Amino acid sequence: MITPDGCAVDFYALMPAFGEPAIVHDAAGAGASILELGSGAGRVTHPLAALGHPVVAVDESPEMLSHVRDAETVQARIEDLALDRRFDAVLLASHLINADEPTRSTFLDVCRRHVADDGCVIIQQHAPAWFAEASDTENTRDGVIYRLRDVARPAPDQISATVEYVAGDRRWTQTFTTNRLDEDVLAAQLAGAGLRLDRYLTDDRSWFRAVPVAAD
């Protein structure tokens, strides 16, 4: 089963977390309520719930959400989400922030509407340095082969490529385009949504924490 954005449900149900839950837990604080946007099959949801966080997992794919346990689920596109609830932390992972500018702005607006005024938004982006370094590569992790191929740069600060996953005799591919955010662009995008950068959470700046800007 392939979701509308090209993700393979079977693969995401198989893939484990790779350190993301610890980053989110440390940034959100123990016991924080978390709204996870684009949860997929729950590879980050499940460890967060195990760490004691009440999680609301949002995804547009009912097939993805059928794999989620120990969390409330909401089937919706991120763009359409309007829960009339606010959370201690909102999680926007999976490099969704690297979408095109209109989509990125919409995602950040959704984050701001759903985060408490004293809460935080935790965001994963492609590390800025990766855009200069990206090339066709292959590596293996936890028995899964990851291949990045057909890397192209159709515009400045933009990469298109195909990622291929191989687990045993199963193989999945997904083609994507992603956009680099320099610090000025990121600051402007956050400000437009009523947010500001609080701090980077990793040395490569692939994870950061934003907080709401107090209203005048």
Image: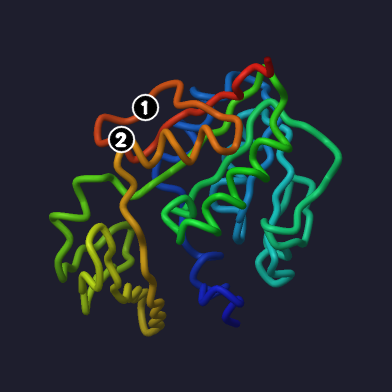
Please say if 68 is above or below 144: above
Q: Is residue 118 above or below residue 18?
A: above
Would you name the residue on which mark 1 appears? 200
Q: Secondary structure at mark 1?
A: strand
- On-image quarter of the N terminus: bottom right
Q: Quadrant of residue 110?
A: top right
Q: Is residue 96 above or below residue 160?
A: above
Could you say where residue 93 lies in the image, as x and y percent from the top left? Answer: 50, 47
Secondary structure of residue under mark 2: loop
Residue on which disc 2 sits: 205
Left or right of residue 152: residue 57:
right
Q: Position of residue 10 (x, y in %)?
A: 55, 74
- x then y, percent, for residue 183: 32, 36
Q: Identify which amino acid the numbered label 2 is placed on.
A: Arg
Which numbered disc covers residue 92? Answer: none
Check the image and report above or below for 12 versus 190: below
Kindly identify the residue that appears in the image at 72 percent across and 52 percent down. 69
Residue located 72% across and 25% down the image: 116
Q: Amino acid at mark 1?
A: Tyr
Which part of the image, by quadrant, shows the C terminus? top right
- Residue visible at 41% across and 77% down in the picture: 174
Q: Which mark is first along the chain, 2 or 1?
A: 1
The CA span between labels 1 and 2 is 6 Å
User: Residue 140, position in %: x, y?
Assistant: 24, 63
Question: In the rendered structure, are the residues bearing label 1 and label 2 in contact, judged by CB atoms less than 8 Å apart?
Answer: yes
